[in-house]
Amino acid sequence: MNISLDLYRIFYVVAKEGSISASSTSLFISQPAITFQIKKLEEQLGVILFTRTKHGMLLTDEGKVLFEYVKKGIENISNGENALSNLKNLDRGTVRIGVSTTICRCVLLPYLEQFHEKYPNIDIQINNNISSNLIKELRNGNLDILLLFSPTKENKDLRIIPIKEVQDIFVGNKKYYDLIKNKYNHLKDLKSYPFIFPNSSSNSRTHLNQYLKENHIDLKPKLEVVSYHLIVDLVKSGFGIGYATKEFIKDELDNKTLYEIKITPNISKRTIAIVTMDKKEPNYSVKKLIEMINQNDRKF
């Protein structure tokens, strides 16, 4: 049977109210219109659903059987509509974010604080990993959104939203800064100094290796470190010259615990981006987080 859901909705309300007049008020439909729709449903089903009495509308045995099924369906639909409304109003929901520890601390965290303050009932799940693994998890449907350095390879299935440009630099403590300043300006001249590089699997190391290759510089690190913040700590302690992102160490540069070692050729800037699947529409919670970051962090 191809019976309109509206007929079942009217039947449900009349059965609950037990009255055409009360149903008219509840549904904002005239009484004659409700009577007509009930008769139409009875004709299509081939049974009598109500007994009309002076005390109201009473379900027949057939009507009682139908009502038990319609009740479940209408109430499930209503619950679904309420759940969607809650999601839209951000009264509930989940945002699954993939991000490196460094970008989480230096870029994302302030927005997570704002988002949580504004939408405290939204669950936030964070997956820290290298970019290649996070992209796999996004494609597998295990993450909703990534925040990472913009992928260098072409990825037609990804939607990439640039939000911030950053500049990588070489840094040292005061000892190394004093040794090098005004003496050298080309990176090749610093080959005898100890260098501390990011781990080979990181996006930062990929960018550094590309820079060295393009400029025909053979530079081997003394130390390779997984943690970005450990690089900063080792440089402060005098273990060598580190590779870092200027915007992430602004406080250290300002308070002179780290010094930029200016070299040529210049290192190209990198872009931090929001990444989602191109063909998949993000849920409402994710859209709100993207909107919050976009409104505040487009600083080029």
Image (cartoon, grey):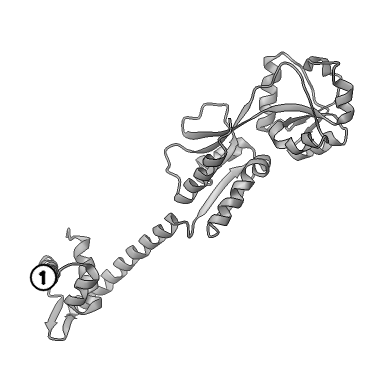
**In front here: 188 or 129?**
188
> Can residue 66 be seen in this snapshot?
no
Q: Which residue is mark 1?
A: 32
Where residue 174 appears, x then y in whole percent?
Answer: 87, 30
Q: Which residue is located at x 53 percent, y 56 percent?
A: 119
Position above or below: 112 against 44? above
Position above or below: 246 against 95? above
- In the picture as drawn, the residue positioned furthest to the top comes out as 216
Q: Which residue is located at x 85 percent, y 31 percent?
A: 173
Q: Which residue is located at x 18 percent, y 81 percent?
A: 58
Where residue 184 appears, x then y in whole percent?
Answer: 83, 16
As drawn, is 154 to the left or to the right of 216? Answer: left
As drawn, is 216 to the left or to the right of 184? Answer: left
Q: Secondary structure at mark 1?
A: helix
**In front here: 212 or 184?**
184
Three-letter amino acid code at disc 1? Answer: Pro
Q: Quadrant of residue 242?
A: top right
Where residue 185 appears, x then y in whole percent?
Answer: 79, 16
Where residue 252 appears, x then y in whole percent?
Answer: 78, 37
Q: Quadrant of the N terminus?
A: bottom left
Tag 1: Cα neighbours inside 10 Å, few (<14), some, or many (≥20)?
few
**In front here: 290 or 38?**
290
Q: Quadrant of the C terminus?
A: top right
> Can residue 279 be seen in this snapshot?
yes
Position above or below: 269 against 137? above
- Looking at the rendered structure, the number of numbered marks drawn on it comes to 1
As drawn, is 199 to the left or to the right of 6? Answer: right
Q: Which residue is located at x 66 percent, y 21 percent?
A: 210
